[in-house]
Image: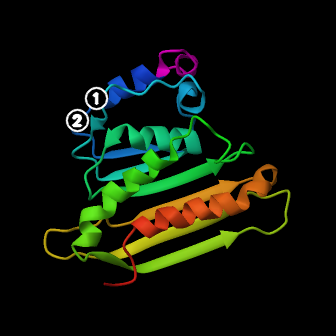
Amino acid sequence: MKKSSWDSDQATAVFFDALAKMPLLQELSILDTSMPFEFETDNFISPKTPHPMPHLRRLALQAGMRAVSRLLSNIVLPPSTSLILLIDHNSYGINDDSSLDLLRFLDVFKTHFGAAGEGGAYYSRVSMDIDIEDDDEEDHHAEYIFEDPHKIAAHGLPERIELRHYWTWEANEHVAVICSLADSLCKFVPHNGP
């Protein structure tokens, strides 16, 4: 698909139609590229129903908070899907973004990990790296990696979950909100034992 087609008003429909035509897709990686322009605008139109992706084993996504939220809220993932989410927070802030449905986004995590957590499964190894030094040249980040899942009976967890929130100095005024969101997401991921 040409870059210019991502900029059209129909880019979101084309994107979700493409996913619907790949029901056996096992890995989806959208890194170091841009999502369709509509994913970041107020003109985003959700599909009528979320697209099931029953065979997806790994989703790697790097995009702004709006795009990540909108994609995850409009697809249905199996509980075994590993997630690598690199979320770029801009200078507008999460709380000031009226088009961001944060509760729906958090519900994706609750659904994804709910049965496994209630069934006793957990990640036994968690690493965290936070960089919030006062440096205007580098991106800041809060990164959480969950590995070594202990599966209990039928309740399995993905092999790896990586959640990375990053921002430039322009969004430093929103650090507390970004860290609060990061903490909220981590609470849905069962870890550190029963």
| Kind of residue indicated by mark 2 | Pro
Quadrant for residue 14, please give it.
top left
Is 98 situated left or right of 90 in this image? left
Q: Secondary structure at mark 1?
A: helix
Is residue 32 in view from this perspective?
no
Residue beneath the point at 51% across and 63% down: 184
Counting from the top left corner in percent of width and height, residue 190 is at 36, 73
Counting from the top left corner in percent of width and height, residue 95 is at 65, 47
Q: Name the residue at the left extreme.
A: 153
Is residue 90 in view from this perspective?
yes
Q: Label 2: few (<14), some or many (≥20) within 10 Å?
A: some
Residue beneath the point at 33% across and 25% down: 48
Report how far apart the C-alphas of labels 2 and 1 lie in the structure.
6 Å
Residue designated by label 2: 23
The residue lying toward the viewer, choosing from 19 and 112, is 112
Residue designated by label 1: 20
Counting from the top left corner in percent of width and height, residue 68 is at 50, 44
Which span is picked out in magenta?
1-11
Q: Label 1: few (<14), some or many (≥20) within 10 Å?
A: some
| Kind of residue indicated by mark 1 | Ala
Magenta stretch holds residue 2: yes
Q: Secondary structure at mark 2?
A: loop
Quadrant for residue 34, please give it.
top right
